Image (cartoon, rainbow, N blue to C red):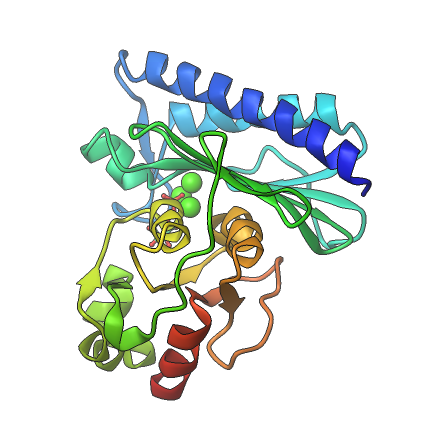
Amino acid sequence: MQTNVVKQLNDAMQTVMRTAREQVLAKMGNKLTVAEKTSRRDLVTNVDHSNEDFLISQIRQLDPTAHILAEEGTGDRVTSMAGHVWIVDPIDGTMNFVHQRNHFAMMVGFYVDGEPTLGYIYDVMANKLYAGGPQLGVTLNGEPMKSPADADLADGLFGASAPLLIQDRFNMQAVVAASLGPRIMGSAGIQISQVLAGELIAYLSYLRPWDFAAGRVLAETLGLVVTTLDGSPVDMLSSGAVLIATKRAQRSILAIV
Ligand code: IPD
Ligand code: CA
Ligand code: CA
Ligand code: CA
């Protein structure tokens, strides 16, 4: 896509994300309706649904012929990354949203023929909007971000996932032991934003497309790497273990997992 078109879309999407945040904050003043999806640890609320509906309606206005993949199911059945594909996670960290009223994000990723094009991670309560893509760079609340230092695993905090660490999947306890220590937030979006900001050297979790679509765009734009655990490119339409890391930390982690 032409850079001026991407820039216009980015300006419009940042406004959409800010409006979505205002709506979510307003709804947090009312009692939430909480339902279990597959288990008591897998929740969805009325706000996940209403925010997904809002984001989809806004994206459809901006890009009427695009395909939209969204977590709570009101998007399209997307089976290919051809053309314009938007991937939406309306509330990332629903468990935190319900139990902490804090530490949750909204995320949108935009791909053109499979190419990462625009990404948004909005840490709602901290009011931090990470936005941009390869043609524009990444901004945090409108201010350009620098690439984080290419620090190694031994020199940084490692963003872990609680189930993987407890079960020691992918040798995660050894990865943690080689780092300065683990940090766990319960929101992929917030942990990925911490990698963007250089607060973590990596984040490793079992993720679904909407958990990493936005983060991949932003991370790769800042010179970070996003791969599976054999170092191959991620497939945007499958779920699996995804590593977002500095280049040096990625090499060290792949040697341990
Ligand atoms: C979840 C969060 C969590 C991660 C899970 C995700 P959701 O997203 O990002 O941190 O460990 O794998 O499903 O369901 O709250 O949007
Ligand atoms: Ca969910
Ligand atoms: Ca999510
Ligand atoms: Ca979600």
- Above or below 161: residue 153: below
What residue lies at 27% left-to-right and 12% top-to-bottom?
Answer: 29
Percent x, y of residue 23: 42, 15
Q: Residue furthest bottom?
A: 255
Count how many numbered circles sit on residues in the image.
Answer: 0
In the visual, does 228 lie left or right of 200? right
- Nearer to me, 229 or 43: 229
Can you see residue 124? yes
Residue 138 vertical placement versus 201 (above, below)? above
**What residue lies at 81% left-to-right and 43% top-to-bottom?**
1
Position in image of residue 22 (x %, y %): 41, 15
Q: Quadrant of the C terminus?
A: bottom left
Instruction: Residue at 72%, 54% (x, y): give it.
Output: 79
Kindly tell me whether residue 56 is visible in this rendering: no
Between 156 and 123, the residue placed more toward the observer is: 156
- Residue 232 is situated, as x and y percent measured from the top left of the image, at 58, 76
Residue at the image position 39 percent from the left and 87 percent from the top:
255
Q: Is residue 126 above or below residue 93?
A: above
Q: Would residue 195 be found to the left or right of residue 186 on screen?
A: right
The percent position of residue 119, horizontal first and vertical second, equals 57, 42
